[in-house]
Amino acid sequence: MIRSMTGFGDAVEQVNGVSYTVDIRSLNNRYFKATLRLPESVSGLEAEIETLLRKKLNRGSITLTLGRRTADAQAVHRVNDEALLNYVKHLETIHRKVSGTSSDHNVNIDLTALLALPGVLQPTEDQAELLQQARPVVMRLVEKAADRLLAMRITEGQALDEDLARQRQLIRDRLTLIAQRVPAVVEEYHQRLRARIDELLSRAQLKITEPDLIREVAIFAERSDISEEVSRLSGHLEQFEQIIAADKGEPAGRTLDFLAQEMLREANTIASKSNDVQIARAIVDVKGAIDRIKEQVQNVE
């Protein structure tokens, strides 16, 4: 069973008047890459969250967004008087330096603007206690959202599997046609060569021995023999199917990508060695199907 790398999962829970929301989105990536967007109050959980995600998800670009909203009464911040007074004193000092000894200029300070300065407004909740309370809730929600994302990845993986199966069947059908065509190609070359030689020799009134003709046909047959490439391509298809059918819970995308590259290599060799129009047409279909497979496995975990 293969899994897609695209998916989405979310989870919501409210505990003691605090609402938590977790959204996880994933896209394809060659490696595991996590981007965590956490409120500052629970940023200390970043390492634990990433560790959990790595256990659940093997590959992909993962974006996790955590929201935390408290009730109005709990959301009140207290004013740090000492910090605010320090800012005011500092502004007055700067004003005196700018205006010199003159006291004609009044200092107008917008306290509302000062509230936005660092350290002036502080949460009423103890940060260590807040983090301790949030940890079990957040980790539970992350696991729940990750499980939902995995379920969606599995559903997407089934759709990928169906498309990959269609492409593999197309390749298998074309390989059957190619294998059936190979003996006829050699025989047709034999007939064309004999007819051409007979035509040329009749003009020159010369003769060619049968062993010489057989030798020439044998050389052509050796050069155009694609049975080994067809066999290897068929073997790659079988291995591809075995990997998809295996239910080991391990990522298979990289292995499938490598097999697709090997299949394309064999198809290119068949195309270069074959001098037959029907085989050439069949191998064009094979290469098109392999390209589709290569495109699809880029999204397989």
Image (cartoon, rainbow, N blue to C red):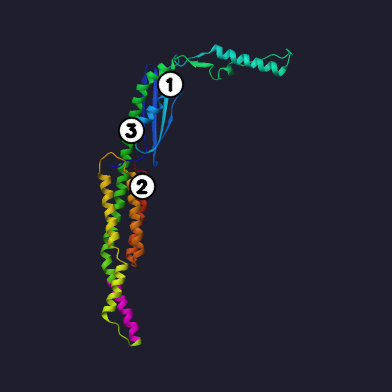
- Looking at the image, residue 211 lies above or below residue 183: below
Q: Residues within 10 Å of mark 3 (few under 14, many from 20)?
A: few
- Where the C terminus falls, by quadrant? top left
Pointer 1: residues within 10 angstroms few (<14), some, or many (20+)? some
- Callout in the foreground (3, 2): 3
Q: At label 3, which amino acid type do we have?
A: Lys
Q: Which residues are magenta?
A: 187-203
Amino acid type at image mark 2:
Gln
Percent x, y of residue 127: 44, 17
Look at the numbered discs 2 and 1 and tell me whether their residues touch, using CB distance below 8 Å. Answer: no
| Residue 123 percent coordinates (x, y) | 47, 16
Q: Position of residue 238 (x, y in %)?
A: 26, 51
Mark 2 residue crowding within 10 angstroms, few (<14) / some (14–19) / many (20+):
some
Q: Nearer the viewer, mark 1 or mark 3?
A: 3
Which callout, 1 or 3, points at the residue further toward the start of the chain? 3
Mark 3 to mark 2 CA distance (whole Å): 25 Å
Can residue 290 be seen here? yes
Numbered badge on residue 69? 1
219 lies above or below 80: below
- Residue displayed at 28% across by 61% down: 228
Disc 1 versus disc 3: distance between alpha carbons? 28 Å
**Is residue 108 in view?**
no
**Callout 1 amino acid:** Arg
Toward the bottom, the furthest residue is 205
* Residue at numbered disc 2: 296
* Residue 168 placement (x, y as % from top left): 29, 52
Q: Residue at x 35, y 52 (%)?
A: 261
